[in-house]
Amino acid sequence: MFNRLGSIVVSYFINLGGITQLAFRFFRSMFSPYKLYNKVINQVYLLGIQSLPITIITSVFIGMAFTLQIVLEFEKFGANFLLGGIVGLAIWRELAPLLTGVAVSARIGAAIASELGTMRVTVQIDALKTLSQDPVKYLVVPRILAVMIMMPLLVGVADGVGFMSGFFVGVPMANINPNAYFSSAINMLEPFDIIGGLIKALVFGFLIGVIGCYQGLNTKAGAKGVGISTTHAVVKTIISIFVVNYFLSYLLF
């Protein structure tokens, strides 16, 4: 049992060190003269734009479910006039960044890990090194930048969609004036509530990209290894998002 526990701890620190090293290489390579624009734009479309449907669907039902629960509680205390502010506060600060990050990580993190993992086991990455091409500059930097660009945009969409889905569910149920819903949001919320959520999205995008790339680049054992790396990428990314979200909430709000 102790051997198993020890191996888990050692593996954790090895992975943490590898991810940290890759992150430093990303920041160093990001400012190199290597032309990245076309590759970044291509990855923005593949990883970001195509994630819009899952983002919209997730945010619609998050807003509806959350509003449904708090309306029932607010009616007991006669606090329905606070509905818009509470929905906006919860969605913009926490729910939209966190759950969009989790939903998107399942798609983007898995896609990055499986793509790079396949390139690893088919020796395409070794071929790049043979041609004196740095895999970090050529493969990692465009993917991480694309995710970091798209995550705040996706969370911005989730903010609006989640808030409005709460409006369409909450106003009829709470029997309040539609203007009161928006007025309470304006009175209770500040611009940094939205900005803080977008900062979270930027950090989550970096985590999704760097963990997915690390797992893909370190794939082993052929086709089976691709599946293992993809699973590990998704699990590690989701855990990291939840942990980092707590500290960001503490620091930002």
Image (cartoon, helix red, strand yellow):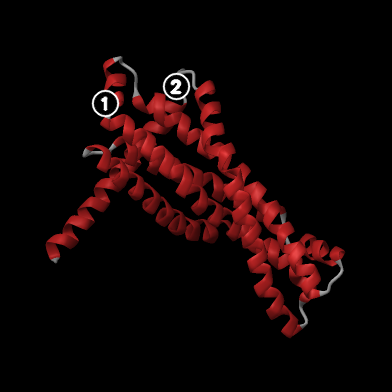
In primary-sequence order, the first of circles 1 and 2 is 2
Q: Residue at x 34, y 18 (%)?
A: 133
Q: Residue furthest bottom?
A: 76
Q: Residue at x 43, y 40 (%)?
A: 111
Give the SS element for disc 1. Answer: loop
Disc ID at residue 123:
1
**Mark 1 Cα within 10 Å, few/some/many (few <14, many 20+)?**
few
* Image-based side of 4 in relation to 183, left or right: left
The x, y position of residue 227, in whole percent, is 31, 44
Disc ID at residue 173:
none
Q: Is residue 120 visible?
A: yes
* Image quadrant in which you'd find residue 132: top left
The x, y position of residue 212, in whole percent, is 39, 42
Q: Is residue 174 above or below residue 154?
A: below
Residue at numbered disc 2 = 32
Q: Residue furthest top?
A: 131
Q: Is residue 188 visible?
A: no
Q: Is residue 252 above or below residue 157?
A: below
Q: Residue at x 55, y 48 (%)?
A: 201
Report the amino acid beneath label 1: Val
* Image-based side of 123 in relation to 95, left or right: left
Determine contact: label 1, label 2, CB under 8 Å. no
Which quadrant is the N terminus positioned in? bottom left
